[in-house]
């Protein structure tokens, strides 16, 4: 059973409401907006140098880039990297996004590069975006439709920002959304936990990485 990392934030009444309303039932039937699908695409959200930074405490990492998350990001990368290898081994396509802030005149600036630890392989798509959602102002929806995909597995950052916006837009466009919780991260722990809980209650299956891998392995059996 998935460990709900946000439970330490809940009051006793919150827990009772979640139980009484059936949110905590196992399986996609527990809430109509949640499900899994059979033909996923992995979306890797904004794993760039200016967001990741050096593998050091966040308060040190922000000395170089004020947006950097340091060891918070690298702890997630320890899961994202192996998960991407797993997805490729199981022929699940991997698509990346890069956010290009308006403050950067050069979209090829090294700050905007995806870090080597989770870099795209040859032939994998990288979509540039200007806003939080990977769908807004991009061709992501067309790519998903052309590929016959019915679900997205979202990894990357930030849980309360671009991951959340992308997850909601995916669900509203008719796709199932799956979040391996070790593979998403945020600079503020409370924001991370609350966003995951909100997504789990309304829009996405939030699971542990090994549970997502078990689901992918079972597709087509």
Image (tube, rainbow, N blue to C red):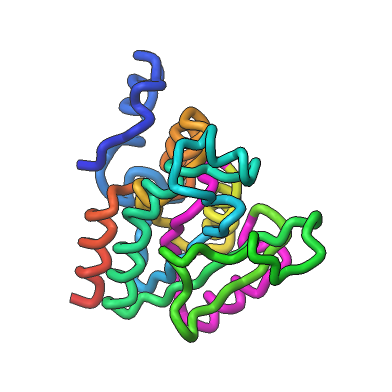
| Residue drawn at (33%, 51%) of the image | 28
> Does residue 114 lie above or below 164 as drawn?
below
Answer with left or right where residue 29 lies relative to residue 220. Answer: right
| Residue drawn at (35%, 36%) of the image | 23
Residue 93, image quadrant: bottom left
Instruction: For the N terminus, give its image quadrant.
Output: top left
* Residue 41 part of the magenta segment: no
| Residue drawn at (56%, 59%) of the image | 48
Q: Position of residue 157 (x, y in %)?
A: 52, 50
* Residue 151 part of the magenta segment: yes
Residue 13, image quadrant: top left
Answer with left or right where residue 134 lies relative to residue 69. Answer: right
| Residue drawn at (57%, 45%) of the image | 68
Q: How many marks?
A: 0
Q: Position of residue 151 (x, y in %)?
A: 43, 66
Is residue 169 visible in this depiction of the protein?
yes
Residue toward you, 159 or 104:
104
Q: Position of residue 177 (x, y in %)?
A: 44, 57
Q: Position of residue 166 (x, y in %)?
A: 57, 55
> Does residue 72 lie above or below 217 as drawn?
above
Which residue range is magenta in the image?
A: 133-160
Residue toward you, 47 or 176:
47
Is residue 205 visible in this depiction of the protein?
no
Instruction: For the C terminus, give its image quadrant.
Output: bottom left
Residue toward you, 151 or 43:
43
Residue toward you, 82 or 43:
82
């Amino acid at each position: 059973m998935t460990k709900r990392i946000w439970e330490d934030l809940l009051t006793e009444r919150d827990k009772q409401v979640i139980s009484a309303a059936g949110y905590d039932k196992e399986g996609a039937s527990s809430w109509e907006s949640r499900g899994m699908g059979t033909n996923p695409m992995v979306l890797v959200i904004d794993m760039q140098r200016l967001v990741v930074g050096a593998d050091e405490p966040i308060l040190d990492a922000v000395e170089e880039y004020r947006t950097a998350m340091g060891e918070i990001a690298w702890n997630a990368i320890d899961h994202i990297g192996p998960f991407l290898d797993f997805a490729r081994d199981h022929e699940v396509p991997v698509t990346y996004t890069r956010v290009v802030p308006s403050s950067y005149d050069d979209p090829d600036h090294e700050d905007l590069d995806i870090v080597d630890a989770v870099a795209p392989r040859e032939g994998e798509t990288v979509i540039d975006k200007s806003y939080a959602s990977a769908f807004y102002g991009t061709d992501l929806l067309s790519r998903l439709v052309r590929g016959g995909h019915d679900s997205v597995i979202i990894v990357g950052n930030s849980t309360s920002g671009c991951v959340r916006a992308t997850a909601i837009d995916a669900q509203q466009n008719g796709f199932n959304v799956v979040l391996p919780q070790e593979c998403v991260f945020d600079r503020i722990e409370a924001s991370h936990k609350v966003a995951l809980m909100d997504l789990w209650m309304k829009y996405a299956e939030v699971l542990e990485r090994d549970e997502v891998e078990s689901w992918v392995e079972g597709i087509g059996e």
